[in-house]
Amino acid sequence: MPPRPSTSISSAFARLSLSRGLQTTAPLPPPTTPLPPSDIPSSSTSAALAHLPPILPSSSSSSLTTLPNSTSEAISLISSQSTSSSGRYVIARLYSRNYLLHPKDILTLPQLKPIQAPGSTLSLTKVLEVGSRDYAIRSQASNAAILKRSMNWKSKRLSSFEGIPEGLVDCNLTILEHTKSPLERILKKKRRKGYKKTIEHKQGYTRLRVGDILLKGEKEI
């Protein structure tokens, strides 16, 4: 059988190299014809977006450039941007951890002792920070570096704790329920000793609901 001519193979390689040469990563030129006009009128679009807040605050806003000179001015600025039930937050320290809390949040903690009946209210005493969207009142303990310096590493506890003074922020937690985790079985075993033991454990938890965050001079609605 006579060998096939190599012209078909060479022409295929030529077409492949030509197609690869046409591929480029350069940006496409701008269109020569203008785009068709939109069917949606600009007046209806602006009217539909009129109720939405701006993405970024305007640079000419003087309320964002002014800084409070006293605690009372900071409280008034926070109150102007938020209410006791919305737009406000606190950072509190519970069980050696910092928690960011908002009104009506549900907080789950290890079981509080002594156990109190559901419906009881507890008051936050260790508040590190309270604020709104743009303003906040912070204590020195809100800085992790300062908390680390005040740590007693032998007992692994805080030797001193300075939060926001009492009376400046008032926030209550309502106990919802006392619950437990699913049953956990832990198997303990020793090799070549014949020791085998199964430990069953249920971790207790307490669920609480965060109430309104009241600043100094405000009353609960």
Image: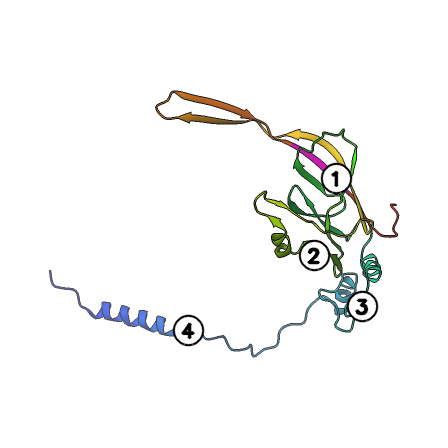
In the shown orientation, is residue 106 left or right of residue 24? right
Q: Tell me residue 131's x, y (percent).
A: 76, 56
Disc on the earlier residue, 2 or 3: 3
Which is more foreground, mark 4 or mark 2?
2
* Type of the residue with mark 2: Gln
* Residue at x 85%, y 52% (from the top left corner): 216
Which is more foreground, mark 4 or mark 1?
1
Q: Tell me residue 85's x, y (percent).
A: 81, 48
Q: Marks 1 and 2, how far apart in space?
A: 27 Å
51 and 167: which is toward the camera: 167
Q: Marks 4 and 2, how far apart in space?
A: 58 Å
Task: Give residue 209's mark.
Answer: 1
Disc on the earlier residue, 3 or 4: 4
Q: Marks 1 and 3, how far apart in space?
A: 33 Å
* Residue at x 64%, y 45% (from the top left corner): 97
Rendered view: 50 above or below 123:
below
Disc on the earlier residue, 4 or 1: 4
Question: From which residue to which does the magenta span run?
Answer: 205-210
Label 3 sits on a secondary structure element that is loop
Disc on the earlier residue, 4 or 2: 4
Residue beneath label 2, please?
A: 140
Task: Give residue 24's mark.
Answer: 4
Residue beneath label 3, please?
A: 63
Q: Quadrant of residue 175?
A: top right
Label 4 sits on a secondary structure element that is loop
Q: Marks 4 and 1, how far apart in space?
A: 61 Å
Which is more foreground, mark 1 or mark 2?
2
Label 1 sits on a secondary structure element that is strand
* Type of the residue with mark 1: Arg
